[in-house]
Image: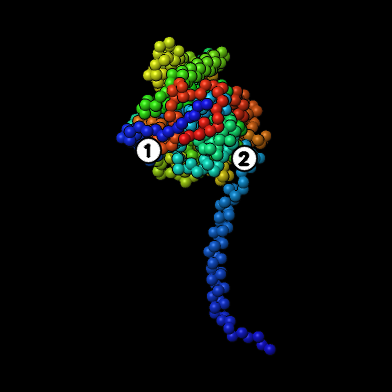
Amino acid sequence: MKRIVYREWRIPSTRYWGILGILAAVAGLGVLAFGYMEHHGHWITGMTNSVVWGVPHVFAVFLILAASGALNLASIGTVFHKSVYKPLGRLSGLLAVALLVGGLLVLVMDLGRPERLIVAITHHNFSSIFAWNILLYTGFIVIVIAYLWSMADRQGAPFIQPIGILALVWRLALTSATGAIFGFLVARQAYDAAILAPMFVVMSFAYGLAVFMLALLFAFHDEGRPLGPRILRRLSNLLGLFVAGVLYFTLIYHLTKLYGAKHDGLENWLLFNGGLQTFLFWVGWVLVGGLVPLGIIHHPDLGRDRNWIAAACALVILGGLATLYVVIIGSQVYPLQMFPGQTILESGFFDGVNGQAASYLPTIPEILLGLGGVAVALIVTVVGVRVLQFLPESLADEAIALDGEDMDQTALKSV
Amino acid sequence: MKDENPVIDPERRAFVGLAVGIGAALVAPGVILHQVAAAPRAEPVSGAVRWGLLIDTTKCVDGCSACVEACGRENGLDLQGRGETGSSDKWERQKAAWVRKVKLQDNQTGRIVNLPMMCQHCEHPPCVDVCPTGASFKRADGIVMVDRHLCIGCRYCMMACPYKARSFIHGEQSGQLTRAPRGKGCVESCDLCVQRRDQGEDSTACVDACVTAGHEAIVFGDLQDPASPIRQMLKELPNRQIREDLALNTGVRYAGV
């Protein structure tokens, strides 16, 4: 029986405040960007009546996906009884809440009328996926906080299993609903595809795990806590599986769109002639976010080097942002197909004259707003691990339990 | 026995009577006039009618934008400030447009068609389905519009609309019309001149302008009334819905495309 000991993150206080200072500065810039956008209106962004969701949505959806994905580690430990993952549960829950808060903030601050958030809370149209998501997101935060309590508090221990199962089901519903925001839109050619819901689930697995692994590697390295190769191997193998899963879903999505003649125009544009979108698809989505990290993880030497593993995680994150850029913005710049078999020669409202895609150039406030959300998520995480016992003292090979090894309930408690 | 009450002062009685009379004379016309003015609006919108448009593209003329300009005047779209956008090109893509002219060419035959595109006032509008707060709604008479007090500016309806019919107000607005107020950060679109519906008028700004321009390419009317001119024309002219595949049962129909 091995006892897991959790401790606060004890890096030198100058370094801690330095990290917080940098993050607070980025978050502050995000707040300024929000104020600027809110004061002037969205004309200062690159968004138009053709591209209505811009870079803030890319960041927000990424953070929301990563949030539900980050919770996987806790689920694997408590719901699926993989003892080796149990010490990771608390950080997993903390990251899940932090990333979701960051993502939601970006989403809310990008609203045309953010001051009417109360309207969104008091008026629900239940045929809207968005309305469901408002409930799913807030419910997720409440459930994960309860989950953390059950993991950390002696009195909560009996509830860890039911809460863990509820959290797992809830996070799957949440991510499916996030995918359905896009998948259920019949109007756009790139959407109207049920596969987007499970694809978003797999994407969340990959992005959430990549963020989790980077946070873990950074926190343990910075404080000098032991992190054994066994757990790292397990995590990076899992990441490889999820990344391969994303590639598989991407393949099926495009094969489905390619099979009928209906979407030939879209596929031809996206895969070959879409300029930035084509580049982001092949280089960002497939290479940087897929094949390269897979190559690193399964390379006999690089796959054992933790710097390379960290690099693979960073690439999955970058590739994820590129993926969501293509999913969210690519589908909007590609013109709506209102008149199949006809070419639009002139239009008073930019309907894709001669099949031209709409233009979108993000402005600095949009990017700062998105980065501000990332900074808020990291601030919550850094403060959390600093003041509370989220991180296990050691993840050295000899300190972690093998799967199937029965652990005493008391071993779950912190000292 | 004489019933005399010395407490009653006849002068005061006369004064009260006069005051009541003057008061009633002042208030009554207001009340009555108000009721007269409010008559069409006082009745709830009825599902007995379904407003719609029929656009005969064979009559729609290349280069004419009378409908677009009339819509701008009626709904205050021509009052939109330029904003402080860097380029006029970007402003063109950011300003609100409820109706636009589109010129199409058939890939096979080369036949050219001109038509106005606006909100298609679907029976099953995707914008209403996706709106989280219910701000995007369909009236009983078939008009799809936005409640600007409930709109939070999430733009999900713009993502969902198959016709690109909706506009987001990207900047501060000034000099608005009381009949068509708009606010920064909300979404809006063609509402079939709903202010005219509520005043009991029987056409839209674009229809009137098209008639004035001598084209008569747009017909407005009640799609449910078998005797209405629009129903008669729909019966005679082969027509279709844009994106029929989505089965939205649009209230705007096109002939000649």
Q: Quadrant of residue B242?
A: top right
- Judging depth in this view, the residue of A131 and B133 nearest the camera is A131
* Camera-nearest label, 2 or 1: 1
Secondary element under disc 2, as helix, strand or loop, is loop
Query: Which residue is outermost to the top?
Result: A300
The residue at which mark 2 appears reads as B140
Q: In the rendered image of this protein, does residue A305 appear above or below residue B78?
A: above
Give the residue type that dot 1 points to: Val
The image's colouring method is rainbow
* Mark 2 surroundings: few (<14), some (14-19) or many (≥20) residues within 10 A: some
Residue positioned 58% across, 35% down in the render? A158
The reply, left or right, for residue A353 in relation to residue A198 is: left
Q: Position of residue A39 (x, y in %)?
A: 38, 40
Give the residue type that dot 2 points to: Ala
Q: Quadrant of residue B2?
A: bottom right
Disc on res. A13: none
- Judging depth in this view, the residue of B18 and A361 nearest the camera is A361
- Judging depth in this view, the residue of B119 and A308 nearest the camera is A308
Cα–Cα span, label 2 and label 1 = 42 Å
Q: Chain of mark 1?
A: A
The residue at which mark 1 appears reads as A31
Instruction: Say if residue A88 shows up in the picture.
Output: yes
Residue positioned 57% across, 77% down in the render? B13
Query: Which residue is outermost to the right?
Result: B1
Tell me whether marks 2 and 1 sit on the same chain. no
Q: Chain of mark 2?
A: B
Residue positioned 66% across, 36% down in the render? B225
